[in-house]
Image (cartoon, grey):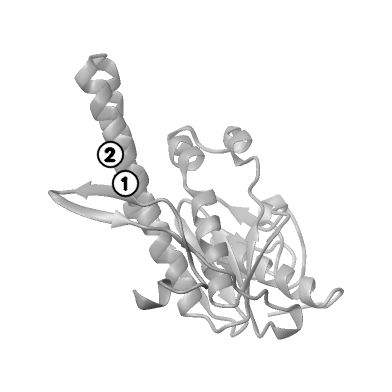
Amino acid sequence: MEQYFSDDYKFGTAKLVSQKGKYFLHIPVTTEVPESELSDICNVVGIDRGINFVIATYDSKHKSGFVSGKAIKQKRANYKKVRQQLQQRKTKSARKRLKKIGQRENRWMQDINHCITKALTEQNPKHTLFVLEDLTGIRQATEKIRLKDRYVSVSWAFYDLEQKLIYKAKKHQCSVIKVNPAYTSQACPVCGHTERANRNKKIHLFCCRNCSYQSNDDRIGAMNLYRMGIDYLVPDTVTAE
């Protein structure tokens, strides 16, 4: 704790949290970190966020990574079921429990996002550029998602993951950019051919109608985001697998 008691850090408002009979004191601290220069970037990581996989990544070593969303999706479905049962009761005790469940779910998802972003920043070198889709307005896109997935999609903590990655990246002298998400799941990262039919959402498979390149559709999204990161650093660069 000694490092935090210096002039380099400023303390925020402390919060006392009770969990399973134990008490924890959360104290946020703030410090200034130098901004990374684009000329220092030595690694690019495209990060595709979704439901089937919380994140799919593709980096400068042409390595892919996945964090499955199956268990998370199931647990959130269980939370939703309990919430619906409590809402039907319409009692004071049910409303109190609803609030507690909501807070518990929020803390649980925040912890998952914390672990994911911590791993991303610690497993990549300093001066890494992380590339995310700009998902502003994702709530307005729910009409394109299957009804049974809408709760998961709309309430998915994309924004929380994004914010945690941004401040952790700065701490590790890395950078984060957000890019236009249009066609990232429909464009072939090998030949550039873009067509909706390239992607089969039901079986999560991408197959280019032009060059026949095949891969997991979430991996394709990460590959295209990686390519956009390279283009951001070196405009008009053509990348190929």
Residue 112 in the image, given as x and y percentages of width and height: 37, 58
Residue at 26% over, 48% down: 17
Task: Please indicate, yes or no, whether residue 68 appears anywhere in the rendered image.
Answer: no
| Quarter of the figure that contains the N terminus | bottom left
Q: Are marks 2 and 1 in contact (CB under 8 Å)?
A: yes
Relative to 162, say whether 151 is above or below: above
Horizontal relation, residue 114 to residue 204: left or right: left
Residue 80 in sight in this render? yes
The answer to whether residue 175 is left or right of residue 150 is right
The residue singled out by tag 1 in the image is: 74
Of the residues shown, which amino acid type is indicated by label 1?
Gln
The picture quadrant where one finds residue 40 is: bottom right
Q: Amino acid at mark 2?
A: Asn
Q: Secondary structure at mark 1?
A: helix
Q: Position of residue 144 (x, y in %)?
A: 60, 37
Instruction: Tell me residue 7's x, y (percent).
Output: 51, 72
Which corner quadrant of the image does residue 186 belong to? bottom right
Within 10 Å of the Cα at label 1, are there few (<14), some (14-19), or many (20+) other Cα atoms? few
Q: Position of residue 170 (x, y in %)?
A: 58, 71
Q: Residue furthest front?
A: 7
